[in-house]
Amino acid sequence: MLGYIIRRALYAIPVLIGVNLITFMLFFVVNTPDDIARMQLGAKRVTPEAIQTWKATHGYDLPYLYNDDKQGLNTVTDTLFFQKSVKVMAFDFGASDAGRSIAADIRERMGPSLALALPTLIVGMLVNITFGLLLVFFRATAIDWGGVVVCVLLMSISPLFYIIAGQFVAGKLMNLVPISGFDAGWDMAKFLVLPVLIGIVGGIGAGSRWYRTIFVEEFGKDYVRTARAKGLSDLRILFVHVLKNGMIPILTGVVVLLPLLFMGSLIMESFFGIPGLGSYTIEAINQQDFAIVRAMVFLGSVLYIVGLLLTDISYTLFDPRIRL
């Protein structure tokens, strides 16, 4: 197990270097250091001298990948890529282009993102698994077909519709919860109820259909017929044996959501004014703040790799035949 973890950690290094390099290239294909300087200076008419001064102050006056004016190793280290992206590999996020500490911003915004994403993920997964199991229990009946139609309808509706409709009905019409905003402590609950509820409802269609497919496949296997021959009820077979054997594909699906769990929901945080990491990333893209963008992309990649590793390890818990 330890050898496997070490190998996976070593495999992750070239992946993270590649992600860093691609992020750098894509960002500077769209934006130039002059564009970033104009955005950060904020004035409509910025002088060329002011742009050059800002670039020199923030290190954007260096060549992108290779510095012809230097000798030896400095030809590589005195470049924009090395100065801005390589330190991130050591989790040294530095300061944003506006001068704020990125690590401090992440610590401050991590709480609101988790407060939104954790209940949405956990409650949503429980609802989807339960609904999927019930559809399989009533398979080939009107309840099953009706449930599948409802799932397809829910999948066909844009997530933006759920947000706008939820804000109008629960916020404007019924005045039950605030439409947007955030507060610390227990008061945050009243700001999170609506986005969490919308996140759960919006995910029922796709989630339940996916779980139903997994459980239907499991339900046709030999061990189910054996369990029936022993006299076990369909309800017990579904919620005990089929659910346990369906955990491997479920875990694989959950790991995809792990980066979002930390990064927050980009659209949801933006619409509801929640100061989490999702809205932080959106603001950084709008402001062309490369320092924040490359830090958040790197962090998301690390979380995804860690999630895949944890998923592989958890496979051994649900299926003893699997050896790492």
Image: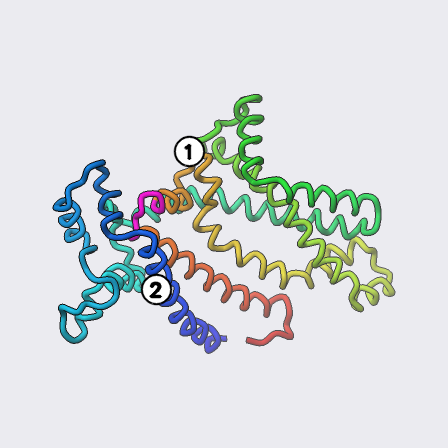
Q: Is residue 166 above or below residue 318?
A: above
Check the image and name the residue furthest to the bottom: 3
Q: Is residue 318 visible?
A: yes
- Asked whether 285 falls inside the magenta stretch, the response is yes
Assign the magenta stretch its main secondary structure. helix
Q: Which residue is mark 1?
A: 182
The residue range painted magenta reads 284-291
Circles 1, 2 touching at the beta carbon (< 8 Å): no
- Asked whether 83 falls inside the magenta stretch, the response is no
Of residues 30 and 224, which is closer to you in this image? 30
Residue at left 83%, top 59%?
232
- Measuring from the top left, give residue 115's x and y in whole percent: 47, 42
- Measuring from the top left, give residue 27's x and y in whole percent: 34, 55
Residue at left 44%, top 59%?
303
- Measuring from the top left, give residue 160's x and y in whole percent: 54, 37
Q: Label 2's element?
A: helix
Q: Nearer the viewer, mark 1 or mark 2?
A: 2
Q: Is residue 243 left or right of residue 97?
A: right
Q: Is residue 164 above or below residue 83?
A: above
Residue at left 42%, top 69%?
12
- Measuring from the top left, give residue 15's x and y in whole percent: 41, 68
Q: Label 1's element?
A: loop
Q: Is residue 84 left or right of residue 155?
A: left
Q: Quadrant of the C terminus?
A: bottom right
Q: Is residue 103 visible?
A: no
Residue type at mark 2 is: Leu
Residue at left 39%, top 39%?
275
Residue type at mark 1 is: Phe
Q: CA distance from mark 1 to mark 2?
A: 36 Å
Q: Which residue is mark 2?
A: 21
